[in-house]
């Protein structure tokens, strides 16, 4: 199973409500997977770089971290702690150095970019959303996932969304059968998945294609040729939102579009609270067909 | 919540209101289904379905049920004698295993609409997605729009009528169901072939179109059926299975 949702705003009027709407969408999909939940949200762009980090012992781990990073980089660093996660505002060009520091300290990096923040934990969508205050978050688009694990362990790092490059994230319903071979090929290109999870390989695949110069549509098209298995993917980039289903298309998907937004849900229930849903265009995405929107 | 819902339903029954309305905003799914299953007939309106699963399933009497909005999985499953009308769209498995009666959907249907149905009439006024009529066993299905891939897979009997186009692998491993398509067929599945449209087929089709409220000329359709080459194992066909 697994439940996936996504909301991409075409206009700014709903920006303040994005987190609230996404939270309701994700909670409505709880029956589809109770193991873990997560959301990636594209909020205000920072001047430099945003990095979301996670620790199972946040009180100890995050204590003094801001000062240590200030000293390391010789530039101002801000840190906003949100439960087990923290969002760092870092100077531009410091990503590699900070990632190396986090690896050394055993702190998990969930994702980085100019606008994306990513929050995921083991637990029900309702509880995960409350812990991170997702309802209060504003933004232009976001994607969410509630997991019924099949392929790898129920852990924070095994939860979706997966982010494998700047401002990119992916959620998945299904399972991939050739992920080990693709994982080795991607690793040779420098895209090394952090976990044994099949979905992270798909995220890395899209990141590698985008890095090679493909646009979002071409990268999604590539998944149909190079990934084997069952999948409905929903993908976010800094300014884009994409959906693709495998040719068998047994993993459910429904989409809704109005003048204000494009929404994705594993089921129609996810849309029940969206404004103007009564008059939205609602359709089931076709198998082996790429859909994407960019602002 | 359970007590409140039952009380409301009982009050409506006592005063004989027609149609009786059940609001899913405060009614438990099991209360809805057990109430409907206990009826011998009558008109019922279900409000605020909000994509809920398994609405109006297992009905066994000639009720007239209108669901105002869109539903989730398995709407009107296992239906016998009842007439269920959905004003919105339906999720996967609508009218699964229907015995008799009718189910009419104003919007679209997700995958495996009418799967394994033994009888009755399923009408989809929008499009139906993949695996429509999979393993149908006597049900009649009329889709005003298009149908997706692998529709009528292993369909055994009954009629599938499509006013629009059909996706890949239509009628794969088909038995004796009749498939009528007005638009394009992307591809036929193993052992499914186009067949001659004889007068008796035009008659069946005209009746189904009329009952489904579809304004279409039977002569515009093509008929597809089984080549009957996969009924018994033949080593030359091993690659087709």
Image: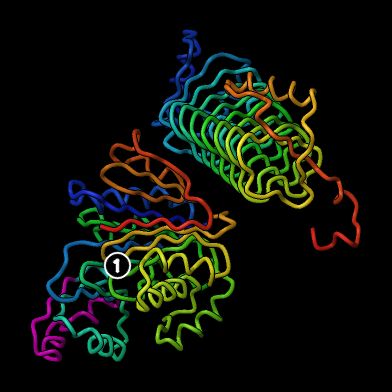
Disc count in the image? 1
Is B72 in front, or is A57? Answer: B72
Q: Position of residue A117 (x, y in %)?
A: 25, 67
Q: Is residue B135 above or below residue B101?
A: below
Q: Quadrant of residue B220?
A: top right
Q: Quadrant of residue A36?
A: bottom left
Residue A42 falls within the magenta-colored stretch: no
Tell me the residue at 39%/31% (across/down): B25
Is B201 in front, or is B139? Answer: B201
Q: Position of residue A271 (x, y in %)?
A: 37, 43
Q: Which residues are magenta?
A: A54-80
Residue lying farthest top?
B15
Tag 1 secondary structure: strand
Q: Position of residue B109 (x, y in %)?
A: 54, 38
Q: Quadrant of residue A68?
A: bottom left
Q: Is residue B62 above or below residue B163?
A: above
Q: Position of residue A267 (x, y in %)?
A: 46, 46
Q: On what subunit does the disc labeled 1 rest?
A: A
Which quarter of the rendered picture does the C terminus of chain B lie within?
Answer: bottom right
Label 1: few (<14), some (14–19) or many (≥20) C-alpha neighbours in 10 Å? many
Is A281 in front, or is A36? Answer: A281
Residue wearing tag 1: A118
**In this rendering, position of residue B114 left or right of residue B239:** left
Q: Is residue B213 above or below residue B15?
A: below
Is A87 in front, or is A14? Answer: A14
Residue A64 falls within the magenta-colored stretch: yes
Tell me the residue at 30%/91% (across/down): A104
Tell me the residue at 56%/81% (across/down): A181
């Amino acid at each position: 199973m697994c439940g996936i949702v996504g909301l991409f705003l075409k206009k700014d009027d709903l920006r303040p409500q994005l987190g609230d709407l996404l939270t309701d969408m994700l909670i409505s999909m709880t029956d589809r997977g109770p193991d873990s939940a997560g959301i990636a949200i594209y909020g205000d762009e920072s001047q430099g770089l945003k990095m979301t980090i996670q620790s199972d012992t946040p009180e100890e781990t995050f204590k003094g971290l801001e000062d240590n990073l200030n000293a390391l980089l010789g530039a101002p660093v801000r840190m906003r702690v949100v439960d087990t996660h923290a969002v760092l505002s870092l100077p531009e060009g410091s990503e590699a150095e900070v990632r190396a520091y986090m690896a050394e300290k055993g702190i998990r990096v969930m994702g980085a970019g100019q606008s994306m923040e990513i929050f995921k934990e083991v637990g029900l969508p309702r509880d995960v959303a409350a812990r991170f205050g997702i309802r209060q978050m504003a933004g232009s688009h976001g994607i969410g996932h509630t997991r019924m694990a099949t392929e790898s362990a129920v852990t924070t790092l095994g939860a979706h969304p997966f982010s494998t490059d700047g401002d990119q994230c992916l959620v998945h319903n299904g399972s991939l059968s050739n992920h080990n071979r693709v994982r080795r090929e991607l690793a040779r290109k420098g895209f090394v998945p952090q976990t044994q999870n099949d979905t992270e390989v798909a995220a890395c695949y899209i990141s590698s294609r985008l890095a090679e110069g493909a646009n979002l549509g071409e990268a999604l098209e590539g998944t149909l040729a190079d990934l084997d298995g069952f999948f409905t993917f929903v993908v976010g980039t800094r300014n884009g939102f994409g959906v693709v289903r495998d040719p068998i298309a047994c993993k459910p998907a429904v989409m809704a579009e109005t003048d204000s937004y494009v929404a994705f849900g594993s089921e129609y229930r996810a849309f029940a609270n969206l404004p103007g849903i009564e008059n939205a265009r609602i359709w089931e995405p076709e198998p082996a067909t790429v859909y994407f929107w960019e602002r | 919540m359970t007590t409140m819902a039952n009380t409301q339903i009982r009050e409506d029954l006592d005063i004989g209101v027609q149609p009786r309305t059940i609001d899913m905003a405060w009614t438990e799914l099991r209360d809805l289904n057990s109430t409907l299953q206990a009826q011998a007939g009558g008109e019922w309106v279900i409000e605020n379905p909000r994509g809920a699963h398994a609405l109006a399933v297992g009905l066994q009497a000639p009720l007239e049920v209108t669901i105002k909005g869109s539903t989730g999985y398995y709407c009107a499953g296992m239906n016998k004698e009842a007439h269920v009308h959905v004003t919105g769209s339906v999720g996967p498995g609508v009218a699964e295993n229907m015995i008799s009666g009718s189910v009419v959907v104003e919007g679209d249907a997700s995958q495996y609409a009418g799967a394994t149905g033994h009888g009755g009439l399923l009408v989809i006024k929008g499009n139906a997605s993949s695996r429509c009529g999979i393993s149908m066993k006597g049900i009649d299905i009329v889709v005003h729009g298009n149908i997706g891939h692998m529709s009528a897979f292993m369909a055994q009997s009954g009629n599938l009528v499509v006013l629009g186009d059909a996706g890949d692998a239509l009628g794969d491993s088909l038995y004796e169901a009749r498939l009528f398509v007005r638009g394009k067929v992307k591809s036929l599945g193993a052992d499914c072939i186009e067949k001659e449209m004889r007068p008796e087929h035009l008659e069946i089709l005209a009746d189904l179109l009329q009952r489904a409220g579809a304004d279409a000329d039977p002569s515009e359709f093509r008929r597809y059926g089984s080549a009957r080459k996969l009924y018994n194992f033949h080593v030359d066909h091993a690659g087709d299975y």
